[in-house]
C-alpha cells in the first residue's frame, strides 16, 4: 500500500508507543510481545510491590521477542544496584522516578527517561525540566506524588501536560483499557505507559485487559479527529 492509499482515518507514519510496566511473569512478557507492545518495564524500586531481583528480571528479559525494548525502572536506588540490574538485564532504556540528577542518570551509559510527578512544580515548566535533565531521551508524566512510586492507578487532568516539550512525552498514571482512547485523543502523547490498569493484582497482568488496551491505542491512532489537518 502506497502512502496515497493510506485510509484517511489513520495518521500516516505515526503510532502511539505502548509500554507495559511492572511485569513479573514470563508468560505476561511473551503475550505482551505478541500483542505488539513496544517496551516492557521491570521494576527495581524498593518501594514497589512489583519489585524484582536482577536474577528474576533476567529470566523475563529472555522471554522478550526481538525488537521489544527492555526498560529498567529505578527510584533512588544506589549506583551499585543500578549497575547490577544493567549487568543482568541488559536494558535498552532506564527509567528514573526518584531524586536522581542528570549526571547520575547518564553515568550508566544507557539511554534514559525521567519520570515527573504531576505534583512537582517542575511538571508545569518544560523549559526548566529540560534544562535540569538535558541528557534525558524523554519525559514520563505520572500522577504519583513526589517521592512515591508509580503504579498507583490514579489518573490526573491530562490538560495539565506541557505542550512545548522538545523531547518525547510519555503519559502514565491511571490509564486503563477504558480510558486510554480518551487519553490519547486529549494529550496526543508519544507513548503511553500502563501497569495497574492491566492487572488483577500487583505484577499479575490480565491477558484480556492487555489485549483490549492495545486495541484501544490503535483505535485512537486511527480516529479521524486525531489526524492532523
Image: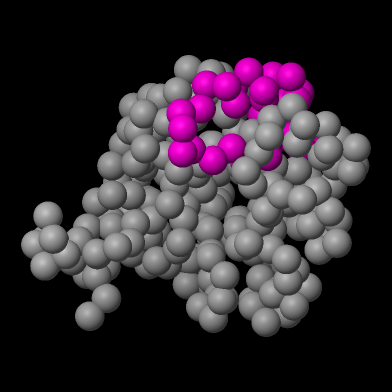
Name which residue lies at 43% across and 52% down.
17
Instruction: Give the vertical position of 116 relative to 162 (above or below).
Output: above
- Residue 61 lies, with reference to residue 197, above or below; the image says above
Q: Is residue 87 left or right of residue 20?
A: right
x and y percentages locating residue 224 in the rendered image: 18, 66
* Residue 83 on image: x %, y %: 83, 38
Residue sitting at 24 percent across and 64 percent down? 12
User: Relative to 140, is 154 above or below?
Assistant: above
* Residue drawn at the location 46% of the way across and 56% of the way down: 191
Quarter of the image where the N terminus is located: bottom left
Query: 46 or 133: which is nearer to us?
Result: 133
Q: Is residue 172 left or right of residue 219?
A: right
Residue stretch rendered in magenta on the structure: 43-72
**Residue 121 visible from this viewpoint:** no
> Residue pushed farthest left?
5
Among the 4 quarters of the image, the one containing residue 69: top right
Give the vertical position of 208 relative to 98 (above or below): above
Q: Where is the C terminus found, in terms of image quarters? A: bottom left
Residue 35: % across, % down = 35, 33
- Front residue (pair 4, 23): 4
Amino acid at each position: 500500500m502506497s502512502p496515497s492509499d493510506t485510509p484517511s482515518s489513520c495518521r500516516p507514519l505515526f503510532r502511539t508507543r505502548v509500554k507495559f510496566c511492572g511485569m513479573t511473569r514470563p508468560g505476561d512478557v511473551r503475550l505482551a510481545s505478541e500483542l505488539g507492545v513496544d517496551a516492557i518495564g521491570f521494576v527495581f524500586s524498593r518501594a514497589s510491590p512489583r519489585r524484582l531481583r536482577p536474577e528474576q528480571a533476567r529470566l523475563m528479559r529472555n522471554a522478550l521477542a526481538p525488537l521489544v525494548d527492555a526498560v529498567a525502572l529505578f527510584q533512588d536506588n544506589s549506583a551499585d544496584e543500578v549497575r547490577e540490574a544493567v549487568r543482568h538485564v541488559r536494558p535498552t532504556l532506564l527509567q528514573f522516578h526518584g531524586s536522581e540528577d542528570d549526571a547520575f542518570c547518564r553515568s550508566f551509559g544507557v539511554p534514559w527517561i525521567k519520570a515527573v510527578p504531576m505534583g512537582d512544580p517542575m511538571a508545569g515548566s518544560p523549559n526548566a525540566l529540560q534544562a535540569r535533565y538535558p541528557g534525558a531521551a524523554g519525559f514520563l508524566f505520572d500522577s504519583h506524588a513526589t517521592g512515591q512510586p508509580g503504579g498507583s492507578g490514579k489518573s490526573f487532568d491530562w490538560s495539565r501536560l506541557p505542550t512545548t516539550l522538545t523531547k518525547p512525552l510519555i503519559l502514565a498514571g491511571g490509564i486503563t483499557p477504558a480510558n486510554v482512547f480518551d487519553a490519547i485523543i486529549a494529550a496526543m502523547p508519544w507513548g503511553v505507559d500502563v501497569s495497574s490498569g492491566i492487572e488483577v493484582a500487583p505484577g499479575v497482568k490480565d491477558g484480556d485487559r492487555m489485549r483490549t488496551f492495545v486495541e484501544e491505542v490503535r483505535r485512537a491512532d486511527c480516529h479521524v479527529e486525531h489526524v492532523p489537518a
